[in-house]
Image: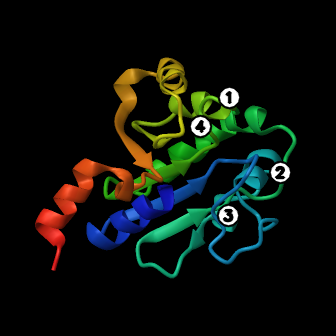
Amino acid sequence: VAVNLAVAISKEIHSNAILVDADLRRPGIHFGKSQSAKGLSNYLSDGAPLSEILINSEIENLRIITAGSPTRKPSELIGSKRMGELFKSLNEFGDNSYIIVDSSPIVSTTEPTLLSKMVDGIILVVMAERTPRETIQRAVKSIDRQKIIGIVFNQIDLKQSHYYSKYYYKYYRK
């Protein structure tokens, strides 16, 4: 979802997008780069400069910061003063720039709660028909509700839904 959002911002509204893989436990954003390439963890723990971790993608207006080298202390790094400094540096790219942060699951780890205090808005991604309502409620309670700008229901099976199948056949059937 984060990758698609970043690509849409860069391609469709022609704005600068910076995609940050802040899931230091199970990184998911690689774009052809090795998982061990310098990234966020190297910036936070080793002092790697921003210029070494900010990758220009093949997509115009899209830059990426991968998770970087594996670490045993993701919560400490994400909650560090240096993480706040990174956001401050990225915000200096201008008003026409969007920073999209992909994080670990909110109810499984503490990093998303730490990140939620540093960002302007949050989009919750929920696995449709698989995530229990109680889990979603717990996630919402763990962050500032005012920052939630949307919820994406992911992996929904539209074929099983009678409502959507009627809609599909009515409007899209050839």
Residue at the right extreme of this rendering: 72
Crowding at mark 4 (Cα within 10 Å: few <14, some 14-19, many 20+): some
* CB under 8 Å between discs 1 and 2: no
* Residue 141 image offset from top left, x and y in percent: 49, 17
Foreground label between 1 and 3: 1
- Which residue is nearer to you in this view: 41 or 3? 3
**Which quarter shows the C terminus?**
bottom left
SS for dot 2? helix
The quarter of the picture where residue 38 lies is bottom right
- What is the crowding at mark 3: few (fewer than 14 residues within 10 Å), some, or many (at least 20)? many
Q: Amino acid at mark 4?
A: Gly
Spatial CA distance of label 1 from label 4 is: 16 Å
Can you tell which mark lies on residue 46? 2
**Residue contact between numbered discs 4 and 3, judged by CB atoms under 8 Å:** no
Which residue is drawn at the image coordinates 33% and 73% (left, top)?
11
Q: Which mark is residue 84?
A: 4
Above or below: residue 64 compared with residue 160: below
Disc 1 target residue: 110
Label 1 and label 2: CA atoms lie apart by 22 Å
Gap between marks 2 and 3 measured at Cα = 12 Å
Q: Amino acid at mark 3?
A: Ile
Residue type marked 2: Asp
Q: CA distance from mark 4 to mark 3?
A: 16 Å
